[in-house]
Amino acid sequence: MPQIQLDLPEDVVEEVRRQAEARGVSVNRIVAEMVRGGRASGWPAGFFDEVVGGWKGESLVRPEQHLPEVRDEL
C-alpha cells in the first residue's frame, strides 16, 4: 500500500488518535475517511440518524397551512 507522510498540528494528531481509539480502528483509517470525506458530496454518514432522527422530544406536528394571501400586482 502506498504511504504518505504528513506534518500535522499536535491537536489534530491527538483528535485523530482519540477518534481511532474510540471507534476501535486504526489512525490510518480515520485519516483516510477524513480525506475521502473532504472530497465526497452529499450528507455525512449517519447524518439522518444522529441529527434528523435524533429528536427526543414530543412529536412535531405541522400546523394547518392556509392559502397564500393575494397581493396587489406592482
Image (cartoon, rainbow, N blue to C red):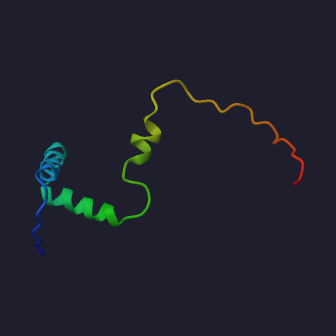
The answer to whether residue 41 is above or below residue 71 is below
- Residue 27 appears in which quarter of the rendering? bottom left
- The x, y position of residue 65, in whole percent, is 75, 36
Q: Residue at x 12, y 66 (%)?
A: 6
Apparent side of residue 20 relative to residue 50 in the rendered image (left or right) = left
- Residue 60 located left or right of residue 48: right
**Quadrant assignment for the C terminus:** bottom right
Residue at 42 percent across and 63 percent down: it is 41
Task: Determine whether 19 is above or below 29 in the image.
Answer: above
Could you tell me which residue is drawn at 43 percent across and 55 percent down? Answer: 43
Task: Single out the residue that lies furthest toward the bottom.
Answer: 2
Q: Residue 73 or 61: which is nearer the viewer?
A: 73
Where residue 49 appears, as percent x and y from the top left, is: 41, 42
Q: Is residue 10 positioned above or below 49 on the image?
A: below
Q: Is residue 10 left or right of residue 65?
A: left
- Farthest residue, direction right: 72
Question: Measuring 39% from the left and 41% from the top, which residue is drawn there?
Answer: 50
Residue at far front of view:
74
Q: Position of residue 18 (x, y in %)?
A: 15, 45
